[in-house]
Image (cartoon, rainbow, N blue to C red):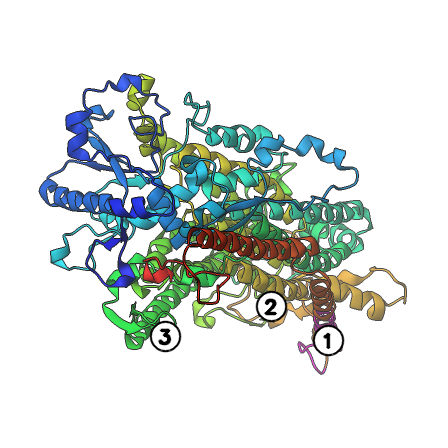
Amino acid sequence: MHRITGKSGDDSLIEMSPTDSVNDDLNGYQQHASSSSGSFQQGQSAIDKQQHSKDSVFFRDGQRRIDFVLSYDEDKDGERKQERRKVYESNLEKVGLELETEDKSESEDGKTYFVKIHAPWEVLATYADVLKIKVPFKANDIPDNSEMPMNWLSTPFRLPEHIMHPEPDYFTAPFNKSKSDFFLIDDKESFFPPSTRNRIVYYILSRCSYISDECGDKDKKGIKRLLNNGTYTAAFPLHDCRYWMKSKDALCESERFSLYKHWAGFSSFFKEQPLNLIRKYYGEKIGVYFAWLGFYTEMLLFAAIVGTICFIYGFLTYDDNEWSKEICSEEIGGKIVMCPLCDKKCGYWKLNSTCNSSWQSHLFDNVGTVFFAIFMGIWVTLFLEFWKRRQARLEYEWDLVDFEEEQQQLQLRPEYETKCTNRKLNRITQEMEPYLPITTKCARTCLSGATVLFWISLIIACIIGVIAYRLAVYAAFASIMKDNPTTQLQVVGPLITPQLATSVTASCINFVIIMILNLMYERVAVWITDMEIPKTHLEYENKLTVKMFLFQFVNYYSSCFYVAFFKGKFVGYPGDYAYMFGKWSKLRNEECDPGGCLIELTTQLVIVMTGKQVWGNIQEALVPWLMNWWGSRKARKHPESLYSRWEQDHDLQGFGQLGLFYEYLEMVIQFGFITLFVASFPLAPLMALMNNIIEVRVDAWKLTTQFRRPVAAKAHSIGAWQEILNGMAVLSVVTNAFIVAFTSDMIPRLVYMYAYQPDGEMNMKGYINNSLSVFNISAFPPANRPDDEENPFWFNSNITTCRYRDYRYPPGHEKQYSHTMQFWHILAAKLAFIIIMEHVVFVVKFFVAWMIPDIPSDVRARVKRERYLVQEYLHNYEVEKLKVQLSQNNHEECTCTPMIYPSIPKHEVLSECL
């Protein structure tokens, strides 16, 4: 073999020559004559396109499979781009790929050329060896004892066996080209599945140069750069058929049709996912995502059931809510005059005006909330631990056990190879490899970090702006809605309060800001990650994941953190209120409703979480469908034979390298909503469950019908997302403990019942009066005193005091307006609750994690069995090979001690894969 680019070993491809295939151990594979652009137009133009099926995934000879397609248009810069294409396609042919070009006159728009690429056996075998792709060498002989008792109950949820298990179970080993007869090769053309074939071809495309050798510019290579500079308009592997019907070609598998029928249809929402078929068609990386999403959805079912039970408990104990009865009572709540909630524009009000919100708050703020918060802390541990076991089983079943990240580390990104002009010696491979100087790396990292901090600061500034909006408009809403006609409505009138109007409008504004900042930051995150020049694809994805998640975390959760932990906590008291930017700003800090801030946190959570999920599904499904409908509107009028398989796929949307990244991000953000703030809304897991049931089918539908087939990629786990989920699981215990202690009124009620109930009874009678402090109206400073026209009609000079939510001594006391001892008792109880809850949950979490092994015992046994068989069969193979050699050389006398393992011919390979 010869190298075609004249470059150092780290970025060269393997050139195929006729002698390679003749002398190869694969016994005389005869390479087909490739049809380049010129030869095809001269020799094949007479073939009538009507003879070819629209679902054809083969060259015109009907034998060679199309593994990849490139498309391009003629434009003004034609000569320069034409030269690039000519050199690039010539270099592709030199490395053994076969090309066939469809002239623009045969495309439906009359201006697009299509270059079809086929990888012959010689190329596939060589690069399967380079990439260490695992292939079968023996049928699996370990009996499957995984049958569950009462397995018939799951029959309605199962798919047909040929869909769930499209391939037999084999023991596998990394492919070795020199030992091809060791593996179970029945048919060379179908030995490597299409997903493996397109992965190999893309590996070659991303490393092939598009300039002549004499130019010597190492930066000019790779299909990605050719797509960016417009030399090619698209590069994609083909779907094997139309999604709604099987291919007419008997040689075509029609796996896309099977996926659409059994997986992507919404009528299959209750069925299991055909994960093995997904993996076979799209590759392991996409397969792992759908396995994780399906498992997450299954586990949500248990959280949703418990959350619904807690909500029902709150509903059933509605009539036992003593403090709400006191608030709504005319004898108690109707006689308690509350201090104004804002300066000047807010008047005095009666406590019973918050009757409805106090009843609503009880649905979520009850004893069940504490139980559910503890339950979710344990649930999230079970979810992560059981997922590790599920992941370990998938690793074994999908031949990813020995697929370590180090293997990917050896495969450098083409962008890294081309942008890093410096070279240094790799101590392991003893070859020169590109590297980024430490000073350049530090400078780029610092600039990247500063950019991320700037954008996070921008989000915080926007959140502060929304808070300022809440403070500014509350007074306006209070003034406007005092005599508003909506208050007269029988059903919704009492629900429309200034607090609700402020909360809902602020949440909606916050949601719009979140969406706008998301769109802007996505481009910035990709740009600064590219600027850092990560070494490998794995490193690139991890860097981008951290940047995007930090931003999204602050963007989505900051408003919830404000309502949960800051609102109503720093308000001061009448006569000495706290202001956001000082008294000059006149933006008085918000107070919580007498029913507590928990109901407002629930409102915030529902709006942001529901809005994100609805918007996400619309964006995921509707936008690609509309773009595809508009792009293919002309082609749909053509007869089937004139709208070929490559043209159909060309008109679809590109999935993109980061397509899966955004799917993970969406689900992890949702995971944060149902864990970090679940104590405020027990129905959050139920909402997430319903969304995910739809999400699985929407993702499947759009991937199967609206996007081009992605290039297959390997992954043995969900990557950096696993550590992010672990971090959020720990943080969720802390946030829920603080929500129950400081946002909920659970602790003050318990302290009152056990320590301050005047009659010594275990009930909540008198709690409302106990929880409200007294202020002398005459002590109001002029800046805080409401205008006369703002006061209600019932207010008169006989009312000398008002009440506010705090635990302070009344006027006239020697410690007037300072905190009472009950305040400090409640604070101590809150801190004690946080410490106890955190320790209990963490102890249970770590005990559960210790009890559940990450790898199931049967999987561990199967892995050991497979490794043993690989060694045994390789040993027997080498012994048989040695016997054959000795029998052929029996006429020569052997004077040396025979070796069991003869030396294996050394192959030239890409140095980054050594």
Hey, which quadrant is residue 26 in on the image? top left
- Amino acid marked by disc 3: Arg
Q: CA distance from mark 3 to mark 1?
A: 59 Å
Q: Which residue is mark 1?
A: 828
Q: Left or right of 114: which side holds 649?
A: right
Measured as percent of width and height from the top left, residue 419 is found at 25, 63
Secondary element type, mark 1: helix
Q: Left or right of 576: which side holds 285?
A: left
Specify the segment rendered in magenta.
814-836
Which residue occupies the foreground of this view, 100 or 726? 100
Q: Left or right of 807: which side holds 646?
A: left
Q: Left or right of 782: which side holds 904?
A: left
Question: Can residue 816 be found in the magenta stretch?
Answer: yes
Question: Can residue 100 be found in the magenta stretch?
Answer: no
Residue drawn at x 43%, y 49% is: 713
- Which circle marks residue 427 in the picture? 3
Which residue occupies the foreground of this view, 170 or 104? 170
Secondary element type, mark 2: loop
Hey, which quadrant is residue 413 in on the image? bottom left
Q: Which residue is mark 2?
A: 569
Q: CA distance from mark 1 to mark 2?
A: 16 Å
Measured as percent of width and height from the top left, residue 351 is found at 69, 55
Eye-nearest disc, 1 or 2: 1
Which of the image's four quarters has the C terminus?
Answer: bottom left
